[in-house]
């Protein structure tokens, strides 16, 4: 069994759904619209067994071709999707947390991970490739600027309704995919109870909650003269985590709590005479080193365990103990399988709307994804 790359629901193994992609007139799709977050249309659909589908499906109305879609959200599945297995990762965070920049750099780092695994990474769909090149790659790697904030889901041209689907190649003979879905910070800061288009959080393989430490007042005060003014802006991470827990509901995704923009924390080493300066200057700490792929493609468990404990302790010291509590003892009463991480996608604060003169020097970007992939047997 595998998951739908859009709603992350498990596809029923013996019941397939097909939609006409020929000449039938499209009509408003109420179900698809609820899951998509914006108006979509549909054409006649047909359910079939796997045996019948193998013989080819033809629309009973126009006699044209049909394409398999998800029976729950009606998203068109990529070709031969059921022959593979997908690890579906949802990203969450308040405004200005750096989720989009993280995705843009992550894909480049995944290419290095694939090389270490003696394979290659590619885009499973033309749409994924187009979105990555237009939204992430060109701003970061061609114009050397920063990525525009993720548009809200209710905007008609919001690219974040489309998943980024990456092909990791075969693993033990089975095609493996990594699916990434981003959500605008405003959508998570203002998420009401009934949001079907955000329902994929409950069924994700892993949810990465990116948390900007500069939103902690103690840190922000000490960094006020060390980082650009725009980094002080952003939403309330505690509110987003509360809404995220509600969206997950009875779901059981793994939860990665990720301190993003960690280069700003590393700048605390330059603030002499403070407790945080002494903490960030600890040469033995895991959160100041990045072994990259030198220890192999898999996540090093000893290093990961040390980092987890250090970040948990650091959050407490930063005055963000309520974040730790919300992760470990949420209102729902059931704690998710979770782990703490630090990342810096760029490696240094931006210079206005431009990258730092040193370019992109990412730090521990792969750790959360390697954790998610490793837990599903990909690494």
Image (tube, rainbow, N blue to C red):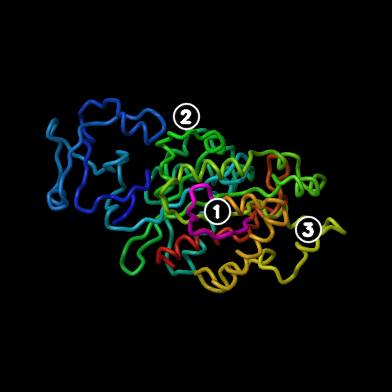
Front of the two marks 3 and 2: 3
Residue located beneath label 1 in the image: 329
Say whether disc 1 or disc 2 marks the residue closer to the N-terminus. 2
- Of labels 3 and 1, earlier in sequence is 3
Choose top left, top right, bottom left or bottom right for residue 163.
Answer: top left
Quarter of the rendering containing residue 2: bottom left
Mark 3 in CB contact with mark 2 (< 8 angstroms): no
Dot 3 falls on a residue whose secondary structure is: helix
Q: Nearer the viewer, residue 369 or 135?
A: 369
Q: x%, y% of residue 282?
A: 76, 68
Q: Of label 3 and label 2, which has the lower sequence position?
A: 2
User: Horizontal and vertical percent for residue 143?
Assistant: 62, 43
Determine the CA span between mark 1 and mark 2.
32 Å
According to the image, label 3 marks what residue? 276
Q: Which residue corresponds to mark 2?
A: 154
Secondary structure, mark 1, is loop
| Crowdedness near tag 1: few (<14), some (14–19) or many (≥20) residues, C-alpha within 10 Å | some
Marks 3 and 1, how far apart at CA = 26 Å
């Amino acid at each position: 069994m595998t998951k739908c790359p859009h709603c992350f629901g498990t596809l029923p193994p013996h019941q397939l759904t097909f939609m006409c992609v020929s000449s039938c007139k499209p009509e408003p799709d109420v179900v698809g619209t609820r899951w998509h977050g914006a108006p979509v249309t549909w054409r006649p659909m047909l359910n079939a067994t796997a045996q019948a589908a193998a013989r080819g499906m033809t629309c009973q109305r126009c006699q044209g071709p049909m394409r398999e879609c998800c029976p729950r959200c009606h998203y068109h599945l990529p070709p031969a999707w059921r022959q593979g297995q997908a690890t579906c990762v949802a990203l969450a965070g308040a405004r200005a947390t750096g989720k989009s920049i993280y995705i843009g750099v992550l894909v480049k780092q995944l290419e290095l991970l694939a090389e270490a695994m003696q394979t290659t990474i590619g885009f499973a769909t033309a749409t994924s490739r187009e979105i990555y090149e237009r939204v992430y790659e060109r701003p970061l790697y061609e114009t050397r600027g920063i990525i525009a904030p993720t548009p809200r889901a209710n905007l008609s041209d919001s690219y974040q309704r489309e998943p980024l689907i990456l092909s990791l190649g075969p693993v033990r003979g089975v095609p493996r995919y990594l699916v990434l879905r981003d959500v605008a910070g405003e959508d998570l800061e203002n998420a009401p109870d009934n949001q079907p288009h955000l329902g994929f959080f409950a069924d994700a393989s892993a949810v990465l909650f990116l948390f900007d430490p500069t939103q902690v007042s103690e840190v922000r005060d000490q960094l006020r003269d060390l980082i650009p003014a725009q980094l002080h802006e952003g939403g309330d991470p505690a509110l987003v985590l509360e809404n995220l827990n509600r969206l997950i509901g009875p779901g059981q995704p793994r939860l990665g709590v990720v301190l993003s923009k960690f280069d700003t924390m590393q700048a605390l080493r330059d603030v002499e005479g403070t407790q945080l300066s002494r903490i960030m200057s600890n040469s033995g700490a895991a959160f100041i080193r990045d072994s990259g792929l030198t220890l192999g493609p898999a996540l090093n468990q000893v290093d990961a365990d040390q980092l987890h404990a250090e970040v948990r302790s650091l959050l407490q010291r930063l005055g963000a103990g309520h974040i730790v509590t919300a992760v470990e003892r949420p209102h729902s009463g059931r704690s998710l399988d979770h782990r703490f991480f630090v990342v810096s996608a760029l490696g240094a604060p931006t210079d206005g709307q431009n990258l730092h003169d040193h370019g992109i020097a990412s730090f521990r970007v792969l750790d959360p994804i390697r954790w998610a992939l490793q837990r599903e047997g990909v690494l």
